[in-house]
Amino acid sequence: MIEEMLGFPFFQRALVGGILVAVTLSVLSFFIVLRRIAFIGVGISHSALAGVALGLVLGVNSTAAATVFCALTAMLIGYISRRGRVHEDVAIGITFSGTMALGVTLIALSGRYMSNLFSYLFGSILNITSGDIAFMALYCLVTLALIALFFRQLLLISFNENIARVAGIRTGFLHYLLLVLIAIVTVASIKLVGIILVSALLVLPAATARQLAGTYRPMLLISVLAGVASLLSGLVLSYRFDLPSGATIVLCGCALFFICFALPVGRRGKPAKGG
């Protein structure tokens, strides 16, 4: 069956785009789980609906509009939470509900039927085009390059932001950078799993890895492997049983997490250590 699937151009495109996104999401998941900001993926991913709707109303490219809108939303969440007057989860809840409401309102005001709204919400990886692959590659490679450039600093602020600040690291800049990178990859992932489900892939890979690893190096590696395994198994099952690809990938990720959670090994939620 695998040979048959690989013979189809649409599956080849889905595989390439999916691996790109899965690896990038898994790396971001590592920092999200370490920093305990899992809910932030929900707020940023759901704001993409408003970005897509804004592009529809203004008559501009929906991907570009969603990218700008998600990045601005991520920075707004970071600004509100770092002011100290509102906790981060409250800031996320406000922006999450507000941007979703804005997206629905803009779609209604446009007076146009979005025939591809379902694919934006739940993903349609098997309909990925060569153009989609190009922008996924751009977004993901830029994100991975920036993470590699600032990896040690991002790792330090994930373990202890106060120590990082004393050491002279620009914690504010890195905080906003991480949020914007999450926004960028969220937009790149819309075709993979959709707006509704992308937040799951920002958490599941590293949450799975945390059940098996006690230090950051194996945790990061297992996170990437878990993300790619969820993608591949989800693609195969969605093709074999004619299931929605995005939902199937997330379900495979959940299954992998619970399997690892049930194993009599691992740290069971304890913070990963350096080294």
Image (cartoon, helix red, strand yellow):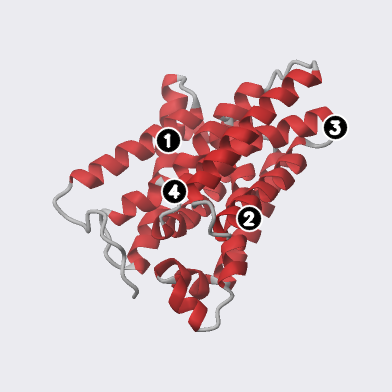
Residue at the spot 42% in from the left edge and 24% down from the top edge: 240
Q: Amino acid at mark 4?
A: Ala
User: Between marks 3 and 2, how big is the CA–CA gap?
Assistant: 23 Å
Q: Is residue 111 above or below residue 130?
A: above
Q: Position of residue 222 (x, y in %)?
A: 35, 57
Say which of marks 4 and 1 sits in front: 4
**Which residue is label 4 attached to?**
38
Give the label on residue 58, or none: 3
- Tell me which residue sits at (62%, 68%) in the image: 173
| Structural crowding at the residue carrying mark 1, measured as other residues with C-alpha within 10 Å and reported as few (<14), some (14–19) or many (≥20) | many
Three-letter code for the amino acid on which mark 3 is drawn:
Leu
**SS at badge 2:** helix
Q: Element type at marker 3?
A: helix
Answer whether labels 1 and 3 touch (C-beta < 8 Å). Answer: no
Q: Secondary structure at mark 1?
A: helix
Q: Secondary structure at mark 4?
A: loop
Q: Earlier in the sequence, mark 3 or mark 4?
A: 4
Residue 169 in percent (x, y) is at: 55, 78
Camera-near label (2 vs 1) is: 2
The residue to which callout 2 is attached is 180
Q: 125 or 59: nearer the eye?
A: 59
Q: Position of residue 161 (x, y in %)?
A: 46, 71
